[in-house]
Amino acid sequence: MNPLVKSIIRTEPHRRFFIRSIQTYSKVAAALATNSGISKGVITTIRPVGNLFNHSCDPHAMTISDGGRVKMVMLRPARQGEQIFISYGPTWYKPCPLSLMFKCCCIVCNKGKAGREWHSLMDRKLPQNARKDVQLMKQILGDSGVNVASKMNAVQQLIKRYADYHPQREDIGYLLKLYGEFLCFIVQDEHLALMRAKLMAEQSELIPEVN
């Protein structure tokens, strides 16, 4: 036991109270913990809202944690009354090398008939006009004169336009992965802009006015 903690816990009732408090805290923390995929693996955060959404390797939405803020963005439509899922790490279009702490029962991991039918859709080809749109979008992505927000919007529009072909590995999977990367960049950029504005405001308060 930490010496400082040990100096506070001097009696048996104190010890029992301390242990019960730790157990209660652990239960609450576990209930509120949410895993989110990041570029280097999985990050676990404790937030009362995030735990309302269960995991699926085929998520409806994406959560992005940055600078003490959490944003949730819908990746594809959800029917009225349908449960909204997020990913705690792996997705079918961006597998994660780290294993989850639980057995995933989503449609992607389903070994039965439903799962086989879902996976049979993965290798479909988009129609010719859709593939032309994807190629045009790739040209836009390679144009250094187009800003990130416009590039992300182009990807988003294609995901919406061809949502009926979900899941499809080659193009739809590529678009979803790309969209997630753009979202992370935009959220991080927003946070940096807020921090810069805050620092400038603080500095302006410290600089005395010259009469």
Image (tube, rainbow, N blue to C red):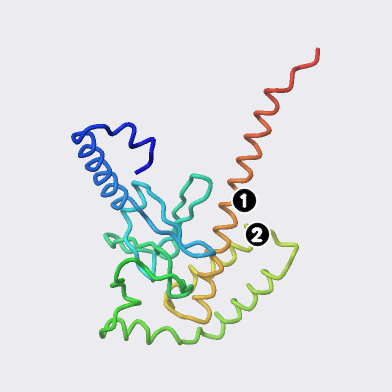
Q: Secondary structure beneath disc 1?
A: helix
- Image height check: is 40 above or below 125? above
Q: Which amino acid does label 2 sit on?
A: Val
**Residue under the point 44% across and 78% down:** 165
List x then y, in percent, for residue 203: 69, 28
**Between residues 23 and 78, which one lies in front from this camera angle?**
23
Report the number of numbered marks: 2
Circle 2 residue: 148
List x then y, in percent, for residue 124: 45, 87
- Find residue 54 and report its image quarter: bottom left
**Residue under the point 33% across and 77% down:** 109
- Residue found at the far right of this picture: 211
| Relative to 122, 26 lies left or right | left
List x then y, in percent, for residue 122: 43, 83
**Residue under the point 54% across and 72% down:** 175
- Find residue 130 and report its image quarter: bottom right
- Give me the C-alpha separation between circle 2 and circle 1: 11 Å
| Relative to 47, 16 lies left or right | left
Circle 1 residue: 189
| Relative to 198, 106 lies left or right | left
**Between residues 17 and 77, which one lies in front from this camera angle?**
17
Q: Which amino acid does label 1 sit on?
A: Asp
List x then y, in percent, for residue 151: 63, 63
Q: Secondary structure beneath disc 2?
A: helix
Asked if labels 1 and 2 touch by Cβ distance under 8 angstroms, the answer is yes
- Image height check: is 20 above or below 129? above
Which quadrant is home to the C terminus? top right
**Between residues 113 and 125, which one lies in front from this camera angle?**
113
Which quadrant is home to the N terminus? top left
Q: Earlier in the sequence, mark 2 or mark 1?
A: 2
- Find residue 2 and report its image quarter: top left
